[in-house]
Amino acid sequence: MKINVLTVFIGFLTAYMGVNVILNPISYDTKFMRIIDLTANKWPFGIALIIFSLLVFWSEYRRIKKLRDNTDSSSEE
């Protein structure tokens, strides 16, 4: 029963991106030399990213709990 590190990383990354969009909605893309302005949509976009990260964490917790329950029931037999 191991924690999937990639899933947790994706959860933290999307939560960070959601908070970053809410706090700093204007960013500059150096590769394409464009300003990305999410000021009008910062709350819906940021909250959607945070909710997605919470769903990722919840699914990982549920997977671990299911594995733990399966190992506990098999050890009782």
Image (cartoon, rainbow, N blue to C red):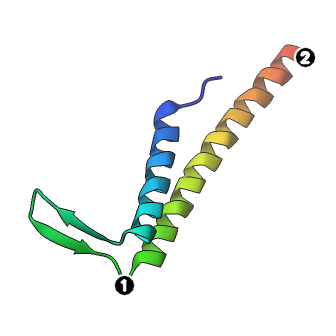
- The answer to whether residue 24 is visible is yes
Residue 45 in the figure: left or right of residue 59: left
**Which image quarter is the N terminus in?**
top right
Camera-nearest residue between 65 and 41: 41
The relative height of residue 4 versus residue 31 in the rendered view (above or below) is above
Residue designated by label 2 = 76
* Image position, residue 37 (x, y; %): 27, 76
Quadrant placement of the C terminus: top right
Mark 2: give few (<14), some (14-19) or many (20+) Cα within 10 Å: few
**Residue drawn at point x = 23 percent, y = 71 percent:** 36
Q: Residue at left 47%, top 77%?
A: 44
Residue 40: numbered disc? 1
User: What kind of element bears circle 2?
Assistant: helix
Image coordinates for residue 61, horizontal then vertical, percent: 67, 41
Q: Is residue 50 left or right of residue 13?
A: right
* Side of 25 relative to 68 (left or right): left
Vertical side of 58 occupied by 1: above or below: above
